[in-house]
Image: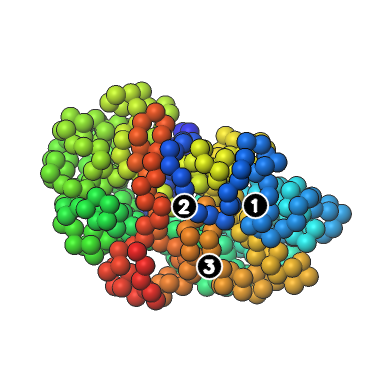
C-alpha cells in the first residue's frame, strides 16, 4: 500500500506542526501476516472464518445487535462523521471514511441496525483550511438526529470543531492527531493520542530490549523534534541515556547522523523515518555500519511495496514495529481471518491493511454498541456519552482495557499503549508485545489516576 502523503499515514501530520498540530509516532501500513496469535479480543474464537457468513456472529455480539438486516422503512439513526480529505490537506486519504461507511453498511446488512433502524453516516469533510471545521460543527449541531460525532483522521479543522461543539455532543475518535482533542469536553479517544502514543516506545526498549542507551534520529523538519520530545521524556522516565541527532530528510546517506547519535553501540535505536527515501537511506546506512536490525524500532510506513526490492537483501528491514492496534497484522488466526473476511464480504479488501481503516471500522461498531445499549427510543447526546464514560473495553482490535480520564490533563485519552511486532521476512510478523503502555514513572509524573505497565 502506498503512502497517501509525503510523510506516510499517521506520520503525515508532522508537516502540519506549524499550525499547532503534531505527528503520530507509529502506524501499520500494508497488509501483512503473522506467525503468532493475537491477544484476546471481543471477537472470540471462530472454528472457521474462511467465509463472510462465518465472520458475522462475533461482530453482532460485540455491537449488541440482532442477526439480520435493518428495516429500511424505519427512520435512520445518524452519526456525524468528519475527515480531512478532498483537498490539499490529506492525512490518511479516504480510507477512514470508507471504513466507517463500511461499518455502517455491515451493521445495516448483518446486525439489524439500531433496534431495527438503519444507521446512517452524515459526512462533512475539511479540505483545505482550519476554518472549514466551523461548517461541519454547525451542521452537526443543527441536526437533531445527530447525537454523536465521529472523527476520522483529523488534524486540520479539529480544533475549530472541538471549540464549537464544546461538549454539546460527544465526539468519538480512534486515534487523535490533534493535541487539543485530548482536553476537549466529552471527547473520547479510544485507541491512542499524541503524545501518549509515543511514550510506550521507551517502555518497550526497557522491558523487551533491556536497553540502557538509545540513539534517536529524526528528519530535521518542522514538527519532528516535538514528536521526539515525547520519546525523550519516556526514555528519561525509564532511566535510558540517549543521544538525539537530526538529519537532512533529502539525504540518501545517514551514516554520519547514526554515528553521531552513537547508534553503533546503542542498545536501542529509534528510527523516526517514514518516506521512501528516508526509509531506504536509514536501512542502507544501518546495514553498512553493521547495526543489528533487532535494536531498531521503526514505523510501518517503511513497508511500502514499491521500494521493497531496493532494501538490502530485497526485503523490508527486520526491525521491530509498533502500532496502536493489532488486528490488521493477522491473517493466520481466527481474529485476523474474521476481520479480512468481513472486509472481503463488503468489497473493501483493498483497504483492510490500512490501520486507519481498522480503527474507523472498530470505532463505528463501538458507537453502534453504545447505541444498542441505550436503545433507539432513548438515544440522545447525554445517553450516548453516559455509555462512553462507563465503557472499559475490551475494544475491538484495540487495548484490552479502555480508561478514559486516566490522565487529568488529557481527559479525552482513553488508551496510551501500543502493540509491538518484529518483522521476520517474507511478509511474516511476530507479535512480541501485545500491549505496552507508558513508562510507570512517566505516568506518575503526568498525574495518572492509576499506574499500569
For the residues labelled 2 and 3, say whether their Cβ atoms are less than 8 Å apart: no
Q: Residue furthest right?
A: 73
Q: Name the residue beneath numbered marker 3.
A: 392
Q: Position of residue 112 (x, y in %)?
A: 76, 54
Residue shown at 30% from the left, 31% from the top: 280
User: Disc 3 to disc 1, how far (Cα)?
Assistant: 18 Å
Above or below, 175 against 284 in this view is below
Q: In this rendered view, identify the residue nearer to me: 447 or 433.
A: 433
Question: Could you tell me if residue 20 is visible in this image?
Answer: no
Q: Secondary structure at mark 2?
A: loop
* Mark 3 crowdedness (10 Å alpha carbons): few <14, some 14-19, many ≥20: some
Question: Could you tell me if residue 51 is visible in this image?
Answer: yes
In the picture, the disc for residue 39 is 2
Q: Secondary structure at mark 1?
A: helix
Above or below, 313 against 363 in this view is above
Q: Horizontally, is 188 left or right of 292 in the view? A: right
Q: Horizontally, is 22 left or right of 76 in the view? A: left
For the C terminus, the quadrant is bottom left
Residue shown at 20% from the left, 52% from the top: 211
Q: Position of residue 95 (x, y in %)?
A: 56, 43
Q: Horizontally, is 172 left or right of 14 in the view? A: right
Q: In this rendered view, identify the residue nearer to me: 316 or 178.
A: 316
Above or below, 32 against 396 in this view is above
* Mark 2 crowdedness (10 Å alpha carbons): few <14, some 14-19, many ≥20: some
Q: In this rendered view, identify the residue nearer to me: 388 or 92.
A: 388
User: Disc 2 to disc 3, how far (Cα)?
Assistant: 16 Å
Q: Name the residue beneath numbered marker 1.
A: 59
The residue mark sitting in front, 2 or 1, is 2
Mark found first going from the N terminus, 2 or 1: 2
For the residues labelled 3 and 1, say whether their Cβ atoms are less than 8 Å apart: no
User: Disc 2 to disc 1, how far (Cα)?
Assistant: 17 Å
Amino acid at each position: 500500500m502506498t503512502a497517501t502523503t509525503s510523510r506516510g499515514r499517521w506520520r503525515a501530520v508532522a508537516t502540519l506542526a506549524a499550525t499547532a498540530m503534531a505527528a503520530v509516532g507509529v502506524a501499520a501500513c500494508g497488509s501483512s501476516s503473522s506467525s503468532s496469535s493475537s491477544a484476546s479480543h471481543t471477537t472470540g474464537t471462530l472454528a472457521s472464518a474462511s467465509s463472510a457468513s462465518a465472520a458475522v456472529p462475533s461482530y453482532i455480539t460485540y455491537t449488541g445487535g440482532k442477526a439480520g438486516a435493518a428495516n429500511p422503512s424505519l427512520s435512520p439513526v445518524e452519526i456525524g462523521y468528519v475527515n480531512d480529505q478532498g483537498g490539499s490537506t490529506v492525512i490518511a486519504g479516504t480510507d477512514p471514511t470508507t471504513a466507517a461507511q463500511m461499518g455502517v453498511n455491515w451493521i445495516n446488512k448483518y446486525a439489524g441496525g439500531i433496534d431495527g433502524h438503519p444507521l446512517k453516516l452524515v459526512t462533512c469533510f475539511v479540505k483545505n483550511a482550519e476554518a472549514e471545521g466551523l461548517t461541519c460543527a454547525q451542521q452537526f449541531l443543527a441536526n437533531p438526529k445527530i447525537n454523536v460525532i465521529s472523527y476520522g483522521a483529523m488534524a486540520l479543522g479539529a480544533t475549530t470543531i472541538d471549540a464549537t461543539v464544546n461538549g454539546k455532543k460527544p465526539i468519538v475518535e480512534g486515534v487523535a492527531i490533534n493535541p487539543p482533542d485530548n482536553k476537549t469536553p466529552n471527547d473520547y479517544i479510544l485507541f491512542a493520542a499524541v503524545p501518549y502514543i509515543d511514550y510506550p516506545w521507551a517502555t518497550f526498549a526497557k522491558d523487551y530490549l533491556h536497553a540502557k542507551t538509545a540513539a534517536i534520529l529524526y528528519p530535521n523538519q518542522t514538527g519532528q523534534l516535538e514528536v521526539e520530545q515525547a520519546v525523550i521524556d519516556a526514555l528519561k522516565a525509564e532511566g535510558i541515556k540517549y543521544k538525539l541527532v537530526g538529519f537532512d530528510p533529502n539525504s540518501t546517506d545517514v551514516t554520519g547522523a547514526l554515528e553521531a547519535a552513537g547508534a553503533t553501540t546503542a542498545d536501542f535505536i529509534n528510527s523516526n523515518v517514514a518516506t521512501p527515501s528516508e526509509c531506504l537511506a536509514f536501512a542502507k546506512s544501518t546495514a553498512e555500519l553493521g547495526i543489528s536490525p533487532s535494536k531498531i524500532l521503526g514505523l510501518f510506513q517503511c513497508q511500502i511495496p514499491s521500494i521493497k526490492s531496493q532494501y538490502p537483501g530485497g526485503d523490508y528491514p527486520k526491525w521491530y514495529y509498533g502500532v496502536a492496534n493489532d488486528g490488521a497484522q493477522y491473517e493466520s488466526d481466527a481474529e485476523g481471518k474474521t476481520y479480512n473476511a468481513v472486509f472481503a464480504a463488503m468489497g473493501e479488501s483493498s483497504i483492510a491493511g490500512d490501520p486507519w481503516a481498522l480503527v474507523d471500522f472498530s470505532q463505528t461498531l463501538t458507537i453502534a454498541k453504545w447505541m444498542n445499549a441505550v436503545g433507539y427510543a432513548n438515544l440522545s447526546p447525554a445517553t450516548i456519552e453516559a455509555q462512553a464514560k462507563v465503557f472499559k473495553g475490551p475494544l475491538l482490535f484495540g487495548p484490552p482495557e479502555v480508561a478514559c480520564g486516566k490522565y487529568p490533563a488529557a481527559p479525552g485519552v482513553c488508551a496510551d499503549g501500543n502493540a509491538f511486532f518484529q518483522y521476520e521476512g517474507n511478509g511474516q510478523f511476530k507479535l512480541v508485545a501485545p500491549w505496552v503502555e507508558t513508562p510507570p514513572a512517566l505516568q506518575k509524573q503526568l498525574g495518572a489516576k492509576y499506574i499500569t505497565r
